[in-house]
Image: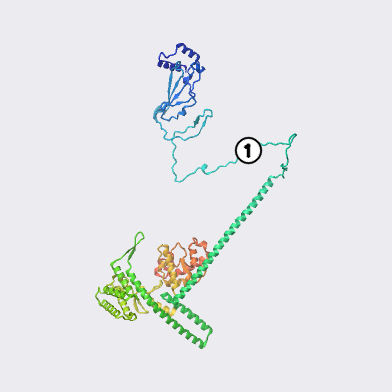
């Protein structure tokens, strides 16, 4: 240490001019007085302050100051180098100067070490072999996290814990948010403490009186053991449980009462709805019987006539005998004949109205534009010259058939019709033109409207015949029942043995189990009105509802569209006995057929007859074995076997039977 101090002092003296050097005696005296701490001011590593034994007034004391090389800021005596906040790439330059420059004109410079980017490191690879390895120094690219530390209470200096130099690796993303236990779990800690509450008492003594009016006399109570304490706590818990259970039971009862009230209100509403539906149905049937218009209405009339006749015959047979019975039967026959005649008159009136509606429907069908669905589900319409021609003829026909219009408008309509039919020269158009001229002439002579009805009907009939000719209305050729080409009549034409007419195959009812062509629709209708007088309206409604519901599944079902009305009637009457399988309800208006197993397509061996409400509940079931009893399931399976045996005789149905049933039928 002394040798280093001597070298530093010599360097300082060399830099100082001779005039400024202190006398030799003074220097020797200074060195003598400062012999022990000779090198301490320069080599001291404290807080930047040198301590000497001499007082500062004698010129031997010194003061040191540290200055930042870049910023020039002076560090105080009580600060450390950490206070300078130097970065990794900066260099700290410190100077130590003695205040007494006359005696110690010296200056020491200390420069911190700056590590290069690459350093050589010698590594021992063997017992006597070494290898130089170049190590690259990684500069920190981020601020190291604070890892804690401690603080000096006296100096106020903070010391931080060191951090690792390795950059932490990022965990791979798992796609889910993870939480540590510290963020999810709440740790609670109970700690009892007694707060300081200093008090003082004052007693009565000689010279001091303290009033005892407000004093209370406290006597110790009965000692409570642990068993008694826990017993009392248990009794209190039981009381709380009683009140809680009472509250819970009251809420439960209130909930059950509310559910019962809603259930009763729903049942009453359903009862009113069913009653109203029944009344509406009876009113509609009564209206249909009073004013029959469709084929189903007349079927209901004949069926009601049959029921009335059977009731009267039973009454006559039960009350009368002999000649009186025969006379009553003859009177019943006369009443039946009168009723049949009345039904016939209603049928003639209905035929006239229905014929006019059928003609308008036929012409509207011809005038409809071409429609098709695009890939996006939208419907596209297109008018062709043929559809425009049919629409023009439809408008003219509607104008011609209108009644109670002014005479001027009627003449305009007739002139439009005359110009339309005059485009084609033939016997039919000539006759129409003559009739038009005749009506115009009669109207000019002010003939009454009632005398022109026959002439106007002839004009309408001939114009309708004109519209139905493909030469004048090409669009009608696709809708006519009798094709204009005679060669097409030889295809799909059958002979009816009852009326002895050759009719297309569409005019014959073909049950699924039939092997030959029977009677046509008209002959079957006449036979039903004369003999059986059955009403197929209810069975037709059941079949329509079944096909509509099956179309909603969209699973390409086919069997339901092969089953005809007669086949469905046989199933309902002979297999299901015209009643619901669950409630035995025999009202066919309220019965529907649905799938037994909704996962498979409908078939006669996968169906069940239920009411509408029962069918809705049945289709919501997921497991039939858990919902129904084994005896009920066995009874339904037996009905399915009977239906399968009946429909196995039909060739069109054999392809839909299971493979085991096909083999059994073949054997």
| Residue furthest to the right | 206
Give the residue displayed 44% in from the left and 73% down from the top. 537
Of 667 and 581, nearer the camera is: 581
Q: Quadrant of the C terminus?
A: bottom left
Q: Is residue 484 above or below residue 227?
A: below
Residue 77, image x, y percentages: 48, 24
Colour scheme of the rendered structure: rainbow
The local crowd at label 1, few if under 14, some if 14 to 19, many if 20 or more residues have their Cα within 10 Å, is: few
Q: Is residue 116 above or below residue 315?
A: above
| Residue furthest to the left | 425
Residue 298 picture quarter: bottom left
Of 395 and 485, nearer the camera is: 395
Residue 492, image x, y percentages: 33, 73
- Give left or right: position of 488 versus 236: left
- Give left or right: position of 359 versus 24: left
Q: Is residue 293 above or below residue 74?
A: below
Residue 598, image x, y percentages: 46, 63
Q: Secondary structure at mark 1?
A: loop
Residue 189 picture quarter: top right
Instruction: Please tell me how many numbered marks the rendered image carries.
Output: 1
| Residue 350 in view here | yes
Q: Is residue 131 above or below residue 619?
A: above
Residue 3 picture quarter: top left
Residue 185, image x, y percentages: 53, 43
| Residue furthest to the bottom | 323
Of 666 and 343, nearer the camera is: 343
| Residue 577 in view here | no
Residue where numbered disc 1 is placed:
195
């Amino acid at each position: 240490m002394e040798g280093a101090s001597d070298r530093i002092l010599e360097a300082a003296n060399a830099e100082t001019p001779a005039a400024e050097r202190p006398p030799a005696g003074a220097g020797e005296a200074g060195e003598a007085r400062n012999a022990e701490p000779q090198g301490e001011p320069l080599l001291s590593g404290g807080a930047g302050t040198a301590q000497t034994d001499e007082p500062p007034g004698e010129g031997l004391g010194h003061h040191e100051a540290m200055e930042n090389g870049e910023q020039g800021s002076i560090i105080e005596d009580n600060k450390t180098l950490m206070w300078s906040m130097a970065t990794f790439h900066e260099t700290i330059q410190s100077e130590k100067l003695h205040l007494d420059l006359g005696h110690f004109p010296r200056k020491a410079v200390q420069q911190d070490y700056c590590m290069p980017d690459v350093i050589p490191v010698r590594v021992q690879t063997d017992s006597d072999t070494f290898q130089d390895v170049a190590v690259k120094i990684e500069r920190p690219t981020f601020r190291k996290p604070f890892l804690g530390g401690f603080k000096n209470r006296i100096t106020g200096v903070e010391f931080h814990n060191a951090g690792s130099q390795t950059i932490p690796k990022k965990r791979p993303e798992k796609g889910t948010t993870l939480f540590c236990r510290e963020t999810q779990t709440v740790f609670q800690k109970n700690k009892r403490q007694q707060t300081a509450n200093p008090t003082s008492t004052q007693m009565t003594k000689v010279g001091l009186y303290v009033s005892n009016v407000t004093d209370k006399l406290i006597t110790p109570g009965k000692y409570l053991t642990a068993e008694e304490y826990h017993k009392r706590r248990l009794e209190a818990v039981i009381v709380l449980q009683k009140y809680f259970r009472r509250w819970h039971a009251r809420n439960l009862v209130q909930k059950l009462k509310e559910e019962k009230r809603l259930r009763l209100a729903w049942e009453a509403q359903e009862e009113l709805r069913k009653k109203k539906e029944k009344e509406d149905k009876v009113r509609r049937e009564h209206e249909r019987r009073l004013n029959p218009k469709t084929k189903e209405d007349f079927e209901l009339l004949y069926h009601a006539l049959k029921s009335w006749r059977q009731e009267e015959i039973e009454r006559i047979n039960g009350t009368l005998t002999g000649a009186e019975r025969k006379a009553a039967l003859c009177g019943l026959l006369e009443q039946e004949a009168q009723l049949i005649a009345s039904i016939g008159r209603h049928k003639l009136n209905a035929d006239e109205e229905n014929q006019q509606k059928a003609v308008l429907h036929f012409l509207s069908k011809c005038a409809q534009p071409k429609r098709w669905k695009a890939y996006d589900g939208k419907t596209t319409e297109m008018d062709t010259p043929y559809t425009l021609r049919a629409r023009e003829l439809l408008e003219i026909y509607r104008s011609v058939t209108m009644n109670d219009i002014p005479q001027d408008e009627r003449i305009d309509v007739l002139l439009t019709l005359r110009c339309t039919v005059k485009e084609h020269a033939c016997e039919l158009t000539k006759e129409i033109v003559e009739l038009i001229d005749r009506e115009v002439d009669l109207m000019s002579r002010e003939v009454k409207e009632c005398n022109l009805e026959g002439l106007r009907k002839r004009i309408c009939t001939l114009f309708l015949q004109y519209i139905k000719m493909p030469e004048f209305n090409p669009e009608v050729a696709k809708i006519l029942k009798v094709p204009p080409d005679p060669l097409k009549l030889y295809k799909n034409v059958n002979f009816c043995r009852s009326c002895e007419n050759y009719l297309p195959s569409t005019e014959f009812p073909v049950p699924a189990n039939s092997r030959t062509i029977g009677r046509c629709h008209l002959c079957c209708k006449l036979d039903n009105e004369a003999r059986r007088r059955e009403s197929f309206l209810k069975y037709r409604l059941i079949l329509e509802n079944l096909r509509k519901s099956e179309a909603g599944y969209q699973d390409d079902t086919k069997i339901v569209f092969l089953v005809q009305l007669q086949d469905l009637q046989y199933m309902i009457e002979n297999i299901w006995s015209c009643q619901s399988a669950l409630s035995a309800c025999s009202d066919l208006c309220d019965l529907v057929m649905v799938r037994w197993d909704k996962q498979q397509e409908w078939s006669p061996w996968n169906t069940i007859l239920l009411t509408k409400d029962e069918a809705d509940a049945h289709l919501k079931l997921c497991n039939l074995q858990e919902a129904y009893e084994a005896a009920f399931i066995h009874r339904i399976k037996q009905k399915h076997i009977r239906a399968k045996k009946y429909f196995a005789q039909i060739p069109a149905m054999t392809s839909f039977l299971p493979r085991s049933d096909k083999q059994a039928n073949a054997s």
